[in-house]
Image: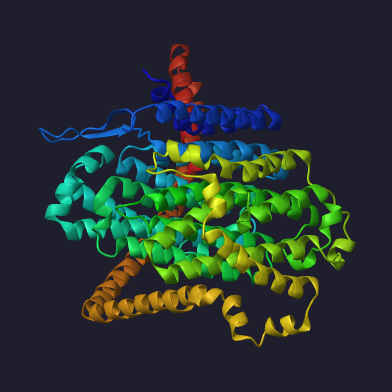
Amino acid sequence: MLLSDVSAWLVWILPLVSSLFVPLIARLGGKARNGFVVIISLVTTALAFSLIPDVYFGSAESLGSSTPWLPSSGINAAGIEAGVFIDPLSVLFTVLVAFFGLIIAIYSLGYMKDEEGLTRYYFLLLLFIGSMIGLVVSDNFLQMFIFWEMVGLCSYSLISFWYKRPESIRAGAKVFLMTRIGDICLLAAIGLLYASLGSFSFRYTIENIATLAADHMPTLTAVAFLVLGGAIAKSAQLPMHTWLYSAMEAPTSVSALLHAATMVKAGIYLVARLILILGPLAFSIPMWLPTVAWIGVLTAFMAATLAMYTHDIKGVLAYSTISQLGFMMASLGTISAHSDLGWFASLFHMASHAFFEGLGFLLAGGIIHAVGTRDMRLMGGLRKLMPITFGLSIIMILTTSGLPPFAAFFSKGLIITSATEAGNLLQVILLYATAALTFAYSLRFTALTFFGKKSEHLEKLHVHEAPKIMLLPAAILAVLCVAWGFVEPWLGGFMRVEGELSLLGAFFSLETPIFLAILAPVGLIIYLTYYKNSQFMMRIRGSSNPLTTILKHGYFFDDLYERIVGKGIVTFSNGVRRVNDTAMTGVVVPAKGIVGFASGVRHAEVVFFERLPQLIANSSIRTANAVRKYLDVLADELLSIIAHRTLSSASKMKRVPQSSLQHYIAAALLGFLLILILIIVTIGV
């Protein structure tokens, strides 16, 4: 048995089972609980990395194993099996999730210190790690969907972690409801596949998908678009993107893990996995790949413009994440029968983004921890107050902007190259524009946070550098931001990408000088606006500019959902209720008569049974009083008779013989007993 056969099961079972022990370990103390979580995260990471050699040096076919899970009642049915599907795609995601789980577990020791509910926090952290890894290594759609829902549950619970804050509760509810729309789409797609093929298995689907395409192409088309719907909601793509900004109410450590590095990539994984399952059929589904590409391009551009407006430091990172996810989705849509460069570029950028955006969130957490606010207008001048954070932020900004030789330079360059090869000029122009906007909001982030004068808010505080336990994970990600781009050729071989990938080719490609050329004017505009405070630029940014209003309202998506869709549903529901009330009028009138009659009967019953005991009691009392009076008279007369008889008998006793005395004494005792009995009886009455 290969090591990967064991590791592939343990890598997700271990954190899932260990999460159940967190409350028990917590009884031993906070340090024991924290150490337990870090150790489990470390072992999980080691298990994830142990999957790499067998996949890298193994055959092109996927590895894995399965075990009976849900038996079938059919005579010839094999039932449903639970299993693991190990290939380069699943291993890449597994390593990324496990590694970031360890990074966040260490970071949380400092960031979440002294917070309430840490046992619940660490329980959910391990539960999420196990669920997310279980999602990407599942070998069938049903098992994958169960983990998909578990990941959503963890996301909702962690976003609402500070449940005493109303905004956290609202954000959690919003995320839960919006992502459920995608879940319904994915479940519908899985149902259609199972109804058509009779199996949830990835391997069975790969072997028989051609039959479905030949006989039921509309069904396959519906499946592809429904899967895309699930990915759009989970990965915050247009128009289901608004939840990710609201999710910033979660602790920053949660934002780094779920909403930058891992969970939001589940939609990217889903589309990438479907492309592998479909194979060449992906190109024959009408309008599917162009739709994937356009959704990605428009999302990337729109989110980048929103990042230029918000003053929330985590909001900038949230919109940056949405924009970079758009790059990944657009790249997946550029694949063709002749090149899978777009597929690889998307996954390469997925890992790059995890490093630089994760770094951004960790640094933002340190800044918020120090200054007590997320509003960048209340910052400024942190360059001297937090020099280590500033240095790491420069690495993050350069990587986010895609400047050489940092990781995103290589991955983002491949995306633009794949879009260029696809031949859609408008998409290429929008991607270049988005890259320029990325550079712009990155510079704005730096200017508002680290440069300029300290705000009045900071003057009142004693700002300090973030704790070392928080800076260490950030430093590790900063190193990866620099080094990750240089693993491109090795990663291409690991992912089994056709063709050669050259590092020098990235520097000397046609896209590089074009990209660098458009950054110069953007940098000048940001310099004049935020460093020189140009009045001309300030007037352009004024509230009278219609674009400012549009950006302030986030392109009015939330207004549409809350005021039109939400109110429309309420209005429709009220209308249905009124129709129902009208239709039931003929039933309601007789029903009211029956209810009235029943109420009258009940009232008579209550009156009768309330008064009956009182009548019986009163009659009993009157009867008892009458009996007592009669017995009193009877007793008096009886005593008088007995007394007279006694005197008469006593006068005669003198004449009675002595032998008869005993009979008289017995009669007297009998009379005494009778009198005693009468007295007791009369007292009882």
User: Which residue lies at the image location 43% right of the left edge and 52% below the top edge?
Assistant: 268
Give whichever of 196, 453 is nearer the camera.
453
How far across and down, in percent of the image, does residue 276 sit? 32, 46
Give whichever of 634, 366 is nearer the camera.
366
Q: Quadrant of the N terminus?
A: top left
Residue 164's image quarter?
A: bottom right
In the rendered view, tell whether residue 443 sits above or below residue 670: below
In the rendered view, tell whether residue 56 sits above or below residue 309: above
On the question of residue 614 being in view, the answer is no
How far across and down, in percent of the image, does residue 657 sit? 45, 14
How far across and down, in percent of the image, does residue 464 sit? 85, 50
Q: Residue furthest top?
A: 659
Residue 319's image quarter?
A: bottom right
Which colour scheme appears in the figure? rainbow
User: Which residue lies at the image location 33% right of the left edge and 58% below the top edge?
Assistant: 185
Count all numbered tags in the image, as a single digit.
Answer: 0
In the rendered view, tell whether residue 245 sits above or below residue 486: below
Q: Residue furthest left?
A: 75
In the rendered view, tell whether residue 266 sits above or below residue 75: below
Compared across the picture, whether 127 is left or right of 399 comes to left
On the question of residue 476 being in view, the answer is yes
Give whichever of 68, 415 is nearer the camera.
415
